Amino acid sequence: MADTKSSLISLGDLTLRDGGRIPSAQLAYATWGTLNEDRSNAVLIFHALSGTHHVSGNHPEAPESCNLWTEELHDGWWDNIVGPGKAIDTDRFFVICANYLGGCYGSTGPSSTNPETGKVFGSTFPHLNVSDLVDAQIPLLDHLKISKLHSVVGPSVGGLCTLTFATRHPEKVNRVIAIASGFKTTVLNRLILFEQILAIENDKHFNGGDYYGSEHPRIGLALARMISHKTFVHLDTFEKRARRDLLHEEEMLSWYQVRDTFQSYMLHQGKKFTERFDANTYLRIIDMWSRYNAVLEGDATSPEDLFTRCNAAGHKFLIFSIDSDFCFYPEEQAEVVKHLEEASVDAVHITVHSAKGHDSFLLEPELYTPYIRELLAD
């Protein structure tokens, strides 16, 4: 396998779906493996909500302009799926992953400097849609001289991007793998995401998003992460992971005392997250997620209109559900499969039986590898 290559690409001035504008935008990305002679072996991966473009291998060096690169991020977040001889085999495929537009790991985001003002974007950074993130990949593929991907893959929020890529640019991909994702954000998830937005907005240090150069809204971001974390991890796993020693949090608590290891564990997860992520980036992504509707993002009139494109392009879909998932419930993937089947798209639906909840796709490669490997080899 060729060494991992991390790079930046200029996207120029971007006009976004909602009318916002990002001047002189750039995208941070990394690649693994080698393109074959006819450039037909490229696999594009979309990362999850708080992921990075470093999918595989060890990366102790921080991406350009990133001061959030903690030790937790040094190992690729999907190293057990992507690599030599693994499910997405980098001895066979050329793998690409980009940090999301609006991100905090090298791509232009709220913590970046606006070249037109010389000041950090902060509150002026515009709202994003999934289609904006997806369309930002096209200049990257053009730069790499890839006209058509072998496959596009994404778990969780990355699955929303995967589905939207396939339906907005059906001519640019053959196979589509979406893991623990959905078709349209549910009311329950919109409310959970709204709770997280309120947690950050009400931090006394948030200042409308203009907190750079002063105290960051760490308590609000920690609370937001705690709200979301309980949907990622199954309760049985909580019991196994909970710390034995209680944390004493003078910073976050005054009257109340932490009573059990579960509360302590959640506080630990929340505080740890603030060391490696930016609150404004978090807000842009969960706002984007809360408004997701595949039909609207694909500029279609109906699910049938949306997926007829996939039929015409000859796509093959692999959809994964996790039976213990409290973040994207299995019914959400069943809805995607229903629409695919109604449009006569070739689709395989696999339900993974796991006790680890939504995080299963990160922790249990053996449950996914045979099916991914089969689809990619087909």
Image (cartoon, rainbow, N blue to C red):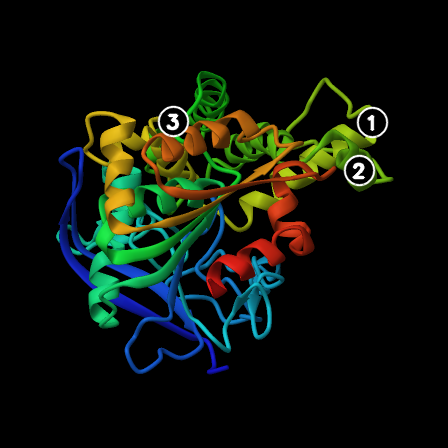
Nearest-to-viewer mark from 3 and 2: 3
Label 1, residues with CA under 10 Å away: few <14, some 14-19, many ≥20: some
Q: Position of residue 311 (x, y in %)?
A: 29, 43
Looking at the image, which residue is at 18% across and 37% down? 17
- The residue tagged 1 is 260
Report helix, strand or loop for mark 2.
loop
Q: Position of residue 115 (x, y in %)?
A: 17, 56
Above or below, 120 against 151 in this view is above
- The residue tagged 3 is 184
Nearest-to-viewer mark from 1 and 3: 3
Report helix, strand or loop for mark 3.
loop
Q: Amino acid at mark 3?
A: Lys
- The residue tagged 2 is 242
Whichever of labels 1 and 3 marks the residue nearer the N terminus, that label is 3
Q: Quadrant of residue 38?
A: bottom left
In the image, farthest residue toward the front: 344
| 86 displayed left or right of 184 | right
